[in-house]
Structure formats: C-alpha cells, structure tokens
Amino acid sequence: MIKKLWITLVFGIAFLSSYSQKLNVTKLDSLFRAMDEKNVFMGSIAISKNGNLIYSNSIGKADIATNENLSFKTKYRIGSTTKTFTSALVFKAIENRKITLNQTIEEFFPTIENSEKITIEMLLKHRSGIADFLTADDFANGYTEAKSKEEMIAIISKLKSDFNPNSKAAYSNSNYYLLTVILEEIYNKSYQALLNEQIVKPLKLRDTYFGGKINLQNNECYSYHFSDKWEKDTEGDTSVPLGAGGIVSNPNDLTIFIKNLFKGEIITLESLKTMTQIQDKYGMGIFELPFYDKKGFMHRGSIDSFGSVLCYFPDENLAIAITSNGAIYDKKKVLIAALSNYFNKPYKIIFEPFKPNQEDLDKYVGDYMSLSYPRTIAITKNNTNILANFSDQSVLSIEPVEKNKFENLWEGSKIEFKPSTKEMIFEENGEKFIFSKK
C-alpha cells in the first residue's frame, strides 16, 4: 500500500511539472509572499493548463477576528464574474428553444422604457441603454437589505434610459438582472436551481453556488477594506444582483468552469462563437483580453470588498482565476504578473504606485486631435489619474505608471504625454496614434 502511494505521488509530481515548464513557480511564489508581507492583498489564485492545475496559492485571512487563514478551499463572492455563468445559461435556453437572441423583452418587462425595442442580445451585450440599477437612489447607501423581483423591476423601470437601444454599449448590471428574471420565468425555476442543474452538477463543481449570508463554517470568508488597517466590509444582499453578481466560488472551480465553457461542454461551440464575438469591446458576458500577441477572454467582478477575475486563452488552453477579499494591490496587476510569468514576458512588481504632482497633471489637461484617429480625446484629471473623454462620450480612466506615462491594463490602452511639444501618444490594442493638443 505504501509502495503504491509512493509511485502515485512520484507520477503526480512528474505530471504536474510537465505542465509547469512555462511557469516560474519560485518567482510567482515570491510575488505572493511579498504581497503577504506588505499586507497589500488577501486572496487566492489558480492556474490550469489543459484542465490540469499547475499553480495555486492563498494569502491573508478569511476572518481577521479569529485569525483564520484563507486556503485552497476558501470560497469568495465573485461579483460580476457571475455574468459569464448567466450568459452561458441564456445560451443554453436559446439552444433549448426557450428564447431567441432577437426576441424583444416587452412581454417580460412592459414597464421598462424601450422594452419593445430591446432584445435579449442587446441585454447580453450591454447595448440596451437601460441604466444601471446601482445608480438608483434606493442603493445610494449600498444594498444590505433583500429586494423582491417586483421591487427590483420597479426600481429599474423608474430609471431613464442612458441611450437609444443598440446605438452604443455601456456596462449596466440591470441587463443581467433582467436576463436572470427571464431565465427564471421561462423555466419556472430559481436561478440557483438552474445554475445547479445546468452548470454545477454536470461539471461537478464542489464549491460554486448562488450565495446567501456569508457562512464561515462553510469555508466562506468576509471581505475587508483598508484604511489604517483591514476593516470588515458590510454584506450586500445577493437578492439584489442575482445573476448579475450573486455567485460564490473559488479559483479552482472557476478554472474548471471556463475550460469547459470553451471546450463546448456547457453550450455548443457555435453558441460560444456567438458569445465571444466582440462589438465595441463587449462580448456576451465576456470581454476580450489581449496580451502581447496572445488573445484571451475574461470577466472581472467586485461586490462588497470582494474581487475576482477569470480569464482563458483558448490557443494555450490556459485558465487563470484570481479571487480576493481585500486588496490594496489590484488584482489586475496580479493577473498581469501571472500572465507575464507564464508567457515569459518582463514585468515589474511595484507596490508603491507612481503619483504625479498636480502641476504635471495640469500640463496634460486639454483636447487632443489626430489625423489618423477618428475621435477627439479630451483629457481631464481625477486625483492622480487622468480621464480620457472620447467624442463618442465614452470615458477611460488611465492610471499613472511613471512620469508622463499612464495606462489602463484592462483595456490595453496606454498614453504618453510630451508636454514640451504638446503631443500625446495614444496606444490602443497595440496600435499607436500621435495626437496634438489644441
């Protein structure tokens, strides 16, 4: 028995290392050790290749009051990463001929503005124009109290549309809340039941479910924000976001889910192709994630002080999931470090971000035009960040990297200012454009 166990262990180590040859585990370990020592991040990561776990780590506390550590088994609220699950359920319903992409929503929500023009597809792609319910006065102080579907639909119905349906795209939690209600009505089942039946049980996900009140006894954790020390955050009631942000999971389960999604084990590959078509930077419950010459897909989320990001690179069969219950060092920087590690790209670990002075920021402010770029960009400042306001009314927040240089890691956008010549170099998806200040 002992001999058999030893052989199994040796085989397992050899099997794991064969998939880890592109990953510098020591360097990645050092990042998490440094984040733990500097007390700037609490959370977990899982990286899988071809469906095999090749790296995992957890640092920080599940409950600071009892000094309970986070672990591989800890479960987190994943916020808007829930939307990828919801989108998969919608496509499953389409495959089951319960609904169609071009079906309008007035039969479900006659009180919502433009419901006779808004389609299921527009909800999925954030092109409905329906305002985000989190902007409503009802949630000015958060959402710690439960809301019924009737209450939520009434709140959303009171909101003025942000734009005409399908004229542009803008992120709105309302879209996925309404998709959840549609799913529940056409199946006459709860979102939780649909999630269990169509995703959790078929994939044998052990740690994924629709969340309720946080339960430490069930390997869940509290979330924390940082002032002079970590302070426990309030708990949002998951009846408010529903399928827009209510799932609880952990990184290992998330990598299993995304791998199976892209392998056609949840919805068909034809449905997946439709789901991952990008228009105005939006897919259907998923976004594109370019990384150098690699093409991945991702979604990220936040709820209370929890954060999550889930990504998949189809050509490499590579999945990375990061969850946090407290972060000063942003999870997107952890993701960039993990991707850079795997793809052998250079990256810097900087815990103290560069802070430009206000005099420098004032030099950047103004309107910029380019003969080779279709939109004017108005630069304004917001604390130490700058905002790139495009003429189509979209706004991009750009964070400082070093003097005169800013970037948004999620969007793959970079800006370099040249105050002496009143020029700005704007990089978008690897392509550079030179702008002149008016």
Image (cartoon, rainbow, N blue to C red):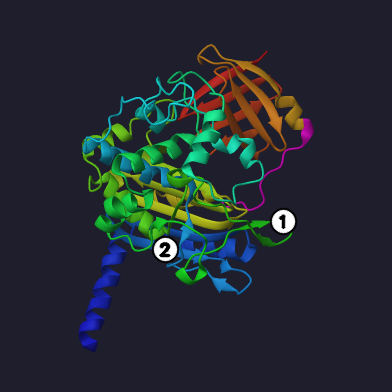
Quarter of the image that includes the N terminus: bottom left
> Circle 2 sits on which residue?
56
- The alpha-carbon separation of the residues under discs 2 and 1 comes to 28 Å
Rendered location of residue 370, percent (x, y): 56, 14
Query: Which image quarter: residue 22?
Result: bottom left
Rendered location of residue 184, percent (x, y): 35, 43
Rendered location of residue 383, percent (x, y): 72, 37
Question: Is 288 placed above or below 61 here?
Answer: above
Quarter of the image that includes the C terminus: top right
**Residue 350 belongs to the span the image colors magenta:** yes
> Circle 1 sits on which residue?
227
Q: Which residue is found at the position 25% from the left and 36% from the top?
A: 98
How many numbered marks does the figure carry? 2
Rendered location of residue 119, percent (x, y): 37, 25
Query: Which image quarter: residue 276?
Result: top left
Q: For mark 1, give the secondary structure.
A: loop
What residue type is disc 1 on? Ser
**Residue 384 belongs to the span the image colors magenta:** no
Of the numbered discs 2 and 1, the one sitting upstream in the chain is 2
Q: Which residue is found at the position 36% from the left and 28% from the top?
A: 107
Q: Residues within 10 Å of mark 2 (few under 14, many from 20)?
A: many
Question: Is 100 placed above or below 327 here?
Answer: above
Magenta-highlighted stretch: main secondary structure?
Answer: loop
What residue type is disc 2 on? Ser
Is residue 84 visible from the viewing direction of this image? yes
Q: Is residue 431 left or right of residue 303?
A: left
Q: For mark 2, give the secondary structure.
A: strand
Which span is picked out in magenta?
A: 349-359
